């Protein structure tokens, strides 16, 4: 019981340090080099080559695959 | 902790929980029907920018930043909208939230507008208004009451904004 209370206290104490980024503070996050996918066109091309040549998909929806004809 | 009385540890936990809640609580967003908070900020081109100086006019208050994609569309559209109404009836007032004024100036050099921009690099005014997304704008009537909160911007929004502004301008005549 005491251990769980102590654990809860530690978690709560840690949560005080959580700070969300406000909408007007997103200048750094808005930079192209901060994006998960900084170049969507290049990513799409790479995906196309991958599924055309290897017939492997990364979970994205696509028709066919393997023959390089789509 | 194990040697502490139960009441003390409960009090400590309650205090911690309160601290968490307070630290996580977001600023209450200003909504339609409420009075717009007053502010006075240094202007991008010198002087000051405030809401008070435009009291008696319909004001479109726009929060923008150079890094905000839709803002690039919004600024020229708002400038065109501003020119459709007499200056004594309608004014666009902007608040720039960039970290540096240089970024805002560079942005406006490419997209010059004829309305004032206040500088708020610390973000006190958007916090005061409870801005939840960028850009966010507040359409304020002649008495300082917020009539519409516009989140984001798309070109197709202009027509509905124009109608809202027309209605407010006509109401005060």
Image: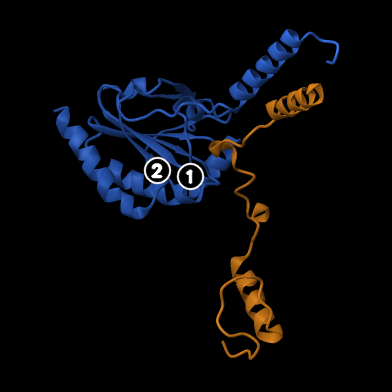
Chain colours: A orange, B blue
Furthest residue in direction front, as rendered: A1
Residue hosting label 2: B113
Secondary structure of the residue carrying numbered label 1 = helix
Q: Residue at x 80, y 21 (%)?
A: A2
Q: Residue at x 22, y 36 (%)?
A: B86
Residue B159 in picture, x, y percent from top left? 26, 50
Residue B74 in picture, x, y percent from top left? 40, 47
> Is residue B84 visible in the rendered structure shown here?
no
Secondary structure of the residue carrying numbered label 2 = loop
Residue A8 appears left or right of B162: right
> Image quadrant for the N terminus of chain A?
top right
Mark 1: few/some/many CA within 10 Å (<14, 14-19, 20+): some
Mark 2: few/some/many CA within 10 Å (<14, 14-19, 20+): some
Q: Residue at x 45, y 50 (%)?
A: B70
Q: How many marks?
A: 2
Asked which quadrant contains residue B145, the reply is top left
Q: Nearer the viewer, residue B152 or B20?
A: B20
Q: Determine whether A56 is above or below B14 in the image.
A: below
Of the image marks 2 and 1, the number of the one nearer the N terminus = 1
> Image quadrant for the C terminus of chain A?
bottom right
Residue B133 in picture, x, y percent from top left? 48, 41
Residue hosting label 1: B108
Identify the chain of the residue marked 1, using the numbered disc in the image: B
Q: Residue at x 70, y 14 (%)?
A: B10
Q: Nearer the viewer, residue B162 or A23?
A: A23
Do the CB atoms of the residues marked 2 and 1 lie less than 8 Å apart? yes
Q: CA distance from mark 2 to mark 1?
A: 7 Å
> Is residue A13 visible in the rendered structure shown here?
yes
């Amino acid at each position: 019981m005491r251990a769980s209370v102590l654990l809860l206290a530690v978690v709560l104490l840690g949560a005080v340090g959580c700070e969300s980024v406000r909408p007007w503070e997103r200048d750094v996050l808005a930079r192209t080099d901060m994006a998960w996918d900084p170049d969507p066109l290049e990513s799409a091309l790479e995906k196309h080559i991958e599924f055309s040549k290897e017939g492997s998909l990364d979970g994205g929806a696509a028709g066919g695959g393997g023959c390089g004809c789509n | 902790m194990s040697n502490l009385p139960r009441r003390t540890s409960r009090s400590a936990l309650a205090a911690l929980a309160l601290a968490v809640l307070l630290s996580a609580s977001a600023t209450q967003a200003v909504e339609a029907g409420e009075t717009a908070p007053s502010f006075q900020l240094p202007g991008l081109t010198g002087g000051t920018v405030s809401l008070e100086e435009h009291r008696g006019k319909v004001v479109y208050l726009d929060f923008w930043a150079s890094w905000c994609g839709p803002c690039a569309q919004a600024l020229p559209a708002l400038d065109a909208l501003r020119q459709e109404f007499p200056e004594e009836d309608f004014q666009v007032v902007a608040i720039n939230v960039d970290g540096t004024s240089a970024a805002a100036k560079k942005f406006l050099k490419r997209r010059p507008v004829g309305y004032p921009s206040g500088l708020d690099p610390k973000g006190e005014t958007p916090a005061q208004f409870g801005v939840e997304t960028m850009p966010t704008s507040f359409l304020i009537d002649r008495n300082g009451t917020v009539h519409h909160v516009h989140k984001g911007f798309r070109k197709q929004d202009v027509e509905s904004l124009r109608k809202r502004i027309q209605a407010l301008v006509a109401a005060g005549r």
